[in-house]
Amino acid sequence: MIHSSCVEISRSAYRRNLRFLKGLLGPKTLFSSVVKGNAYGHGLETFVPMAQECGVRHFSVFSGEEAYVADRCRDADTDLLIMGHIGDEAMDWAVDRGVAFYVFDLDRLCAARDAARRVRKPARVHLELETGMNRTGLDTDEMEKAVGLIRQDRRLFRLEGICTHLAGAESISNYVRVHQQLRTFRRMAGRVRKGGLRGGRRHTACSAAMMNYPASKLDMVRVGIAQYGYWPNQETRMRYQMSGTSPEAQSRPDPLLGIMRWRSRIMSLKRVRQGDFVGYGTTYQASRRQVLAAVPVGYYHGFSRSLSNLGHVLVRGRRAPVAGYVNMNMMMIDVTDCPGVSRGDEVVIIGKQQRARSTVRSFSDLINYLNYEILVRIPASIPRVVVD
Ligand SMILES: *Cc1c(COP(=O)(O)O)cnc(C)c1O
């Protein structure tokens, strides 16, 4: 291995997650795989072809540049949707490639119309409605105008979706707000249709919403974190677990499997005596004779410095705690209790090793990060490979 670490993506685990998630959907609800943020750190170019093999036919990205990469690895019958930014320069490209995109203001709609004229193809648009998140979206006035503009130039548009995003479906504390949003959405989407624009999938749900608010699923769900095998938060996981009526149902195993395994190797071993300090400064002092190992993964690789003296990795199926500060390109770990440890041994940072598992959550909880954040910090330069 040339690289100091490598990320494996498990196809079989992904298949299982998909089966579980699709089991929560009716036959008419389309599954869109959200692959923004380099497929949540899983590697866009590795993940998209693998997901297609598993039957996914719709991907959602944030930006034009992500769409550009996804477009190069999608099959001809796979749809692509941009939910956020498109540079003005990329609009012609998007329309020409048949990439669909959100329209959340009238400028974007006019830019789409002009691009459609230039490239002589209809722009595939999803009207994003403002229902209470107050981030991006058309308010009622803008929505009426948008409907008018689309009707004026019908040939230049294909209305493929009507959508919104919910402001925190993972937490019960947002219950009133989310319900209000869903009501507003239904009302506004009804007006788009009454305005003469039929068709277009209605979609509002992310991972948390499809689990916590079944009514949000509608014609399509946009699933990010859950397909990768992580719950949006612990509350959502608990609610799912508690929803089983019988005690057996409540103790059923986690239906989501983390599909990522991030591994490295021990670079060097070091024996220290009781009282020796390890690494920069004096934050780590050996409490006995210890064996430490240098691992070539540091905060440059997304392993947060906040995990200094706090995080752990796996070696020989045992937990090895981080010893001292996490450095830019490496860290020291305590392998005193890993029998037979030797240079070149596999180090698992995220994922399973023998019967032990190191979870993303075990990091994110320690340093108060979202699991989303831990995942996307793994740099794109680390190789991703699909394994079975
Ligand atoms: C990121 C995102 C999603 C997916 O969210 P998850 O919580 O990862 O499922 C859905 N919709 C929009 C608009 C998003 O930005």
Image: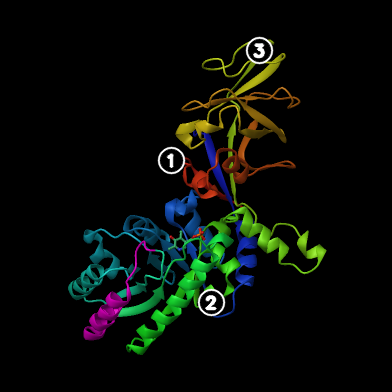
Q: Is mark 3 on a helix, strand or loop?
A: strand
Q: Which mark is residue 272?
A: 3
In magenta segment, residue 336: no
The disc labelled 1 sits on which kind of residue?
Answer: Ser
In magenta segment, residue 156: yes
- Residue 375 position, x and y percent, is 51, 46
Q: From what the image shows, is residue 330 above or below residue 131? A: above
Left or right: residue 222 compared with residue 337: left
- Residue 220 position, x and y percent, is 49, 74
Disc 1: which residue: 381
Left or right: residue 207 compared with residue 71: right
Q: Is residue 103 visible?
A: yes
Per the model, the C-alpha gap separating discs 1 and 2 is: 35 Å
- Residue 161 position, x and y percent, is 39, 76
Instruction: Kindly indicate whether the residue at mark 3 contacts the one at mark 1 (C-beta within 8 angstroms).
Output: no
Asked if the beta carbon under badge 3 is closer than 8 A to the nearest atom of ligand 1, the reply is: no
